[in-house]
Amino acid sequence: MARRILIFDTTLRDGEQSPGASMSASDKLVFAKQLASLGVDIIEAGFPVSSPEQFDGVNRIAREVEGPIIAALARAVEEDIRIAYEAIKPAKRKRIHTFIATSPIHMEYKLKKTPAEVIDLAKRAVSYAKSLTDDVEFSAEDATRSDLNFLKEVFLCAVEAGATTINIPDTVGYTTPDEFYNIVKEIKEAIGDRAVISVHCHNDLGLAVANSLMGLQAGAGQVEVCVNGIGERAGNAALEEVVMAINVRKDIYDFECGVNTKEIYKTSKMLSSIIGFPIAYTKPIIGRNVFAHESGIHQDGVLKYKQTYEIMKPEDVGRSGSDIVLGRHSGRHALKAKLRDLGISYDEDMFEEIYKKFLQIADKKKNVHEEDLIALFADMGIQEDKMIYILKNVQIIAGDNTIPTATVCIEKGKKEYVESSVGNGPIDAAFKAIEKIIGIYGMTLEEFSINAVTSGKDAIGEANIAISIGNERYNGHGVDTDIVVAAVKAYLNTINKFIYRNSLN
Ligand code: KIV
Ligand code: ZN
C-alpha cells in the first residue's frame, strides 16, 4: 500500500521571507483558507515573536482555519516558544516548531556556542514546547552542512525530550540528491519510528524538488514546501512540483498525500496576486506555456494523441481543459456552474461581487475565459485592509503627437480625489497623478510587467509592480481589460500595502 506522506506548507512563513513577499494578516488568512481547501496537512503560519503583525497573522489563522494543523516557528528560546504557543493556542490542532543551527559554521560564527551548548539548548527548547503542546517539531538548521554523527546526537536528544517530528533542512540549498538520500537514510535508521522525519529543501542550486523527493524515498514522512516555490533567496521546494511528481510518477514514488491537485492552479494564482510576484511562463505545472504546444510536430502529435507530448492533463491541476467561454449574456447560474467546475469556492456575498466584476469584464470583452475568471478571483484575495485608496477612474490622453496626460480619480473613505499629470508615457503620467493625490514621493519603481492572461486582442491584462521606499520593498498586482488601468490598480495596491504596513508601526 502506498505510504501516506504529510505536506507541510510553509508559504506563510519561509515563503513570506522572500524579499517583497510580505503579506498582511488578512491576506494570510485568505490564503490559509485556500491552503486548507488545497488539502495540506500542516500550515506553518508564521514566526510570531518577530513582530506584532506576525503574531496577529498566526493567531487569526489559528482561530479561523479548520482542518490542517497550525504550526508556528520559534527559535530555541523560551520567550519565542511561549509567544508561538500563545499565537496558535486557539487552533484545534497545533504544533510548535523550534529550531537551532547545528553546522560548525553556524555554531561558531552565528550562535557563538559549543556543540554541547547547542544540544543543551535544543533539549530545553523541546521540553518546554512539549510542556505546552504534544505536537512538537524540531529542526536542525543547516543540517546538511553539519557533522552527521553530531546531527544524529542532536536529533536523538530532541526525540527523547519529546519531539514528534524531526526536520532536516537543507538551509542553504547546498546538498545534492544522492548525498541527501544518504543523510536522511542514516537519520531515519537512528530515529526509527520514534518521530516523523521531515525534509525542508532550499533551491539555491535548483535541486530543492529533486532533494525533497530523494528525502521521501529515504524514509521521510513529511515534506516542507512553498506554493510557487517562493522562499528565502532562490526559494523552497515548490509544493505543486513535489505533489505532481509524486502523482505523475506513481510507478516510482509509492506515496500518497492529501492534496487535491485540482486546487493547485487557483492557489498558485491567488498567491501570485497577493504578493504581486509574476509566474514565469515556463514555471513547471503553473506557468503559462507548460501546456502549450508551439512546434508543428508537437501540435500534430498532441492532436493525434495527447500523451505524445503531455505527461499530465491541465485539468489535473485545475487549469482549463476545454475552456468553454462565458459572455455578457451568461447568467448567475452559468457563472456559478463554471466556478464550481473550476473548484472556486465563494460565499453568497462574495458571489455578487464576483458577478459584478464578471459583468464589467464581459461588457468589455466578448468572451470571458476560464483563465480570466481565475485571475479575477485571485485578484479578489486582495483584502480590505489594503484598500485604503480605491481607483474610481482614470482618463488618458496619449499618442505619438501629444504629451501623455492622465487624470486619475481615487477614493479614500467616502471622499474622492482627482489630479492630473503629464509624464513620459500614459502609465508614468497616471502614476504621477496618484503621487500628487497621495503625497508620497521618493518611491523607486523597481519592477513593472504587464502580461496578457489569455490570448487575443481583448485579453485581460495582469500588471505586477515592485517599488522601493527607503530600504523597504513592496509588490502589487492589478487586473483589468485595459492595461493602463491594470497598471494603475497595481500601483495603488502597492502604495496601499506601504501605507497599511506603516500604519501598524
Ligand atoms: O531553512 C531552514 O533552515 C529553515 C528552518 C527554520 C526550518 O527554514
Ligand atoms: Zn527554510
Image (tube, grey):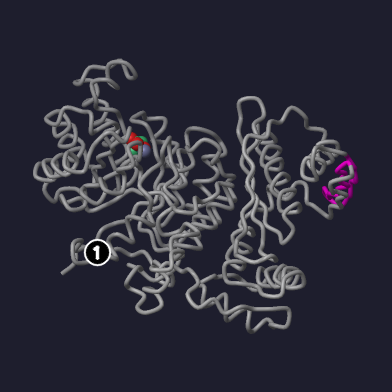
Q: Quadrant of residue 479?
A: bottom right
Residue 406: give x, y in percent of width and height: 86, 46
Q: Is residue 181 left or right of residue 352?
A: left
Within the magenta stretch, is there residue 121? no
Residue 294: give x, y in percent of width and height: 46, 64
Q: Quadrant of residue 376?
A: bottom right
The residue where tag 1 is placed is 249
Seen as rendered, the residue at the extreme left is: 189
Foreground of the two, 57 or 22: 22
Instruction: Please say whether residue 37 is visible from this viewpoint.
Output: no
Foreground of the two, 106 or 397: 397
Q: Residue at x 33, y 48 (%)?
A: 224
**Which image quarter is the C terminus in?**
top right
Prevailing secondary structure of the magenta residues: strand
Q: Which residues make up the magenta segment? A: 403-421
Q: Residue at x 66, y 62 (%)?
A: 460
- Write down which quadrant ligand 2 falls in: top left
Residue 352: give x, y in percent of width and height: 70, 72
Q: Quadrant of residue 401?
A: top right
Q: Residue at x 49, y 50 (%)?
A: 280
Instruction: Judge whether 398 appears above or below 348 on screen.
Output: above
Instruction: Please say whether residue 301 is visible from this viewpoint.
Output: yes
